[in-house]
């Protein structure tokens, strides 16, 4: 399967076997889940969300993996300078759809609280955006974040040169 690398990171396509780590790092962490449009309070709902998100890897039934080799990626530290190399730090990637023969999508990311403040997500998202730009028929890419709850996401998007549109939290780039 198609992996991406960054200076310190390895981004591997999310797999169904990553669902438990995804649930633990993202949906069980109140600081992470508060910035998402998902309910993290119920264990059954957390499990459903993590299982559904793992379907945005090559194990799911999505054309974008076959055609573009892009979707959601599990993030790990390939250098061992932040965490053990096999540890699930979070995820990033794009939700894609085809519109008028162009692939368009939303950049997405979530990182475990204990890894915040290390530049991990800027580095990981930069790799994903660069890969998106290289796919045949790449269209537009956007991202949405909760400005009041998660201003760090806005800083990441600014580093990636996404532009704010319509005085909203929707940023466009790529």
Image: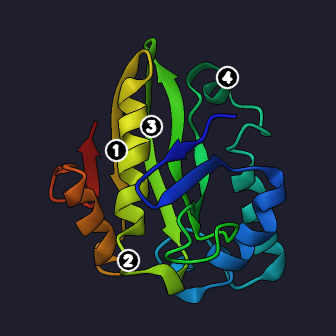
- Sequence-wise first label, 3 or 4: 4
Which secondary structure lies at badge 4? helix
CB of mark 3 within 8 Å of CB of mark 4?
no
Please say if 34 is above or below 137: below
Sequence-first tag of 1 and 3? 3
Q: Nearer the viewer, residue 137 or 147?
A: 137
Task: Give how far apart the Cα atoms at labels 4 and 2 are.
Answer: 32 Å
Q: How far apart are marks 3 and 4 (CA)?
A: 16 Å
Q: Which of marks 3 and 2 is in front?
A: 2
Which residue is identified by label 4? 66
Q: How many C-alpha atoms fall within 10 Å of the one at disc 3: few (<14), some, or many (≥20)?
A: many
Check whether the beta carbons of the residues at disc 3 and disc 2 lie within 8 A of each other: no
Front: mark 4 or 2: 2
* Label 2 element class: loop
* Left or right: 22 in relation to 78: right
- Give the CA distance from mark 4 to mark 1: 22 Å
First in sequence, mark 2 or 1: give its number: 2
Residue indicated by mark 3: 105
Q: Marks 2 and 1: which is nearer the front?
A: 2
Q: Residue 167 placed where, x, y %? A: 15, 59
Whole-percent x and y of residue 17? Answer: 84, 57
**For the C terminus, which image quadrant?**
top left
Against 15, residue 88 (above or below) is: below
What residue does disc 2 label?
A: 118
Do labels 1 and 3 touch, CB within 8 Å?
Answer: yes
Would you say the residues marked 4 and 1 are in contact, meaning their CB atoms lie under 8 Å apart? no
Distance from the alpha carbon under mark 3 to that under mark 2: 26 Å
Between residue 120 and residue 37, name the one nearer to us: 120
Q: Where is residue 3 in the image (x, y as percent from the top left)?
A: 60, 41
> What residue is shown at x 53% (from left), y 42% (from top)?
95
């Amino acid at each position: 399967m198609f992996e991406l690398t960054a200076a310190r990171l390895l981004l591997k396509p999310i797999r169904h076997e990553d669902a438990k780590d995804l649930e633990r790092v993202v949906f069980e962490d109140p600081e992470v889940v508060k910035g998402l449009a998902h309910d993290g309070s119920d264990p059954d709902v957390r499990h459903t969300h993590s299982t559904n998100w793992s379907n945005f890897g090559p194990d799911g039934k999505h054309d974008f993996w076959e055609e573009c080799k892009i979707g959601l990626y599990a993030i790990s530290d390939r250098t061992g300078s932040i965490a053990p190399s096999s540890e699930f730090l979070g995820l990033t990637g794009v939700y894609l759809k085809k519109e008028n023969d162009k692939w368009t999508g939303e950049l997405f990311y979530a990182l475990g609280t204990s890894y915040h403040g290390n530049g991990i997500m800027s580095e990981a998202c930069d790799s994903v955006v660069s890969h998106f730009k290289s796919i045949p028929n790449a269209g537009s890419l956007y991202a949405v974040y909760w400005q009041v709850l998660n201003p760090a996401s806005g800083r990441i998007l600014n580093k990636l040169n996404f532009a704010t549109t319509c005085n909203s939290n929707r940023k466009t780039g790529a």
